[in-house]
Image (cartoon, grey):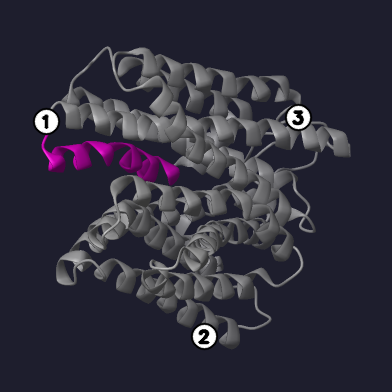
Amino acid sequence: MTEARDPTVFENEGDAPPSMTPGQIIRSLGAVIASAFAASLTFSICMPLLVLILERRDTEPWLIGLNTAAAPAGLLIFTILMPRIVGYLGTMRALYLGFILMILSIVLLPVFDNVWAWFPLRFIMGIGIAIHWVVSETWINTLVDNRIRGRVMGIYVTAMSAGYLGGLPILLFVGSEGPEPFFIVAAALAIGVLPLVLARDLAPGIKAHAGFGVFAAMKRAPATMLAALTDGFVFGALFAFFLIYVQRLGYAENDALILLIVMSVGNVFLQFPVGMIADRYDRRVLLIVFALLMVVCTAIFPLALGDPYVLWPLLFFWGGIMGGMYTCGLALVGQRFNRDELAAANATFIFVYEFGHLVGPPIAGVAILLWDPHGLIVLSVVGGLLFAIIATIRHLTHKGQDNA
């Protein structure tokens, strides 16, 4: 007798064996984490590369900003559609499609070498990024046991952060002239597909529940999604204006860049320790603690600028804490949602994070106009405090319930 299937669930079983050995799980996770590193490295090269090219052509700043926003726009719009797309295509075909869209758009950028042609190409790139982002995080959350979820997510975020950090030195070495940088980026993406191809038989089937979408995920775990929104907002605002803020306080451009690199290095190296902590303690409480630590680091930063012995450790820890909110929140998504809800939950988490990352810089720009330059610091502190207060109230009033 054939088992009846719930018609509200789209299911792609994949080719993974029903019960994988620890070695197979490690291979599977290693493949998707390696591909995430390649995707992050590519994005970190491509974004400043296009800005440098447009700036060299005396393109208006507002047009550069608008063109840069095309990729996040594609990411935001299609993130919502990801659960159904993945449910229809399946795990591997969806990932292949994401890489094809990214590679195709990057290769065509020097062919259609015009700022207006770059709008649809960057939008397509954003769609490819959205597919890879949602599928890879759902893949990991599907395979990982809750006992080690934080540590695995820490490794995943470390790989993404390392890829993002490594892009700038590569761009400095390659340069921004001619079509070569674009083809190097495309080649890096193509190499990133290889681990997935080798592990295609170990891809987990991803289920997508037709009745469970973005709003349902937000209702199920509002504090978790608010953490992603807050982290994206503060992270986006600070990283967009960090160099400007430091330079307006008297630092030279190269010195300001070094400070930003120190913060980024902290983001890379502290994610695994954060994951270890997230596996031992209540992750909902940890999100509140991380938000408060982020507030303290942000508030102390202007005072520490004159003392390098305080400043450098502070920057390292500050960067790690901001990345740690994402790591802990991602582990909480895997803990809180069932397997057939994970695709929608991960898509929602990414959507709200990226939305915060998109609206943070323009709001920070207004804050700096109101109080130059400390409006940036005040805005970031207020954002972190608001989340900590709201999340604390929810935690105390809904303690023991599965809706925080």
User: Which is nearer the N-term, disc 3 or disc 1?
Assistant: 1
Q: Where in the figure is residue 232, as x and y percent of width and height?
A: 42, 57
Q: Which residue is mark 2?
A: 393
Which quadrant does the C terminus fall into?
Answer: bottom right
- How far apart are labels 3 and 1 at the CA level? 49 Å
Quarter of the image that includes the N terminus: top right
Residue 58, numbered circle: 1
Looking at the image, the residue that sits furthest to the right is 21
Q: Is residue 404 in view from this perspective?
A: no
Q: Going 21% across and 65% down the picture, which residue do you hit?
A: 368
Q: Nearer the observer, disc 3 or disc 1?
A: 1
| 264 left or right of 10 in image | left
Residue 68 magenta: yes
Which residue is under mark 3?
Answer: 202
Q: Would you place residue 303 above or below residue 96 in this image?
A: below
Q: Which badge, 2 or 1, is on the more N-terminal residue? A: 1
Residue 39, given in percent of the width and then of the height, sits at: 51, 32
In the displayed structure image, the side of residue 298 where residue 204 appears, left or right: right
* Quadrant position of residue 278: bottom right
| Disc 3 residue type (three-letter) | Leu
Give the amino acid at mark 1: Asp
Q: CA distance from mark 2 to mark 1?
A: 50 Å
Which secondary structure, mark 2?
Answer: helix
Residue 110's quadrant in the figure?
A: top left
Q: Are marks 3 and 1 in contact (CB under 8 Å)?
A: no
Q: The magenta stretch spans which residues?
A: 59-80
Secondary structure beneath dot 3 equals: helix
Which element carries disc 1, helix, strand or loop?
A: loop
Q: Position of residue 400 (x, y in %)?
A: 68, 81
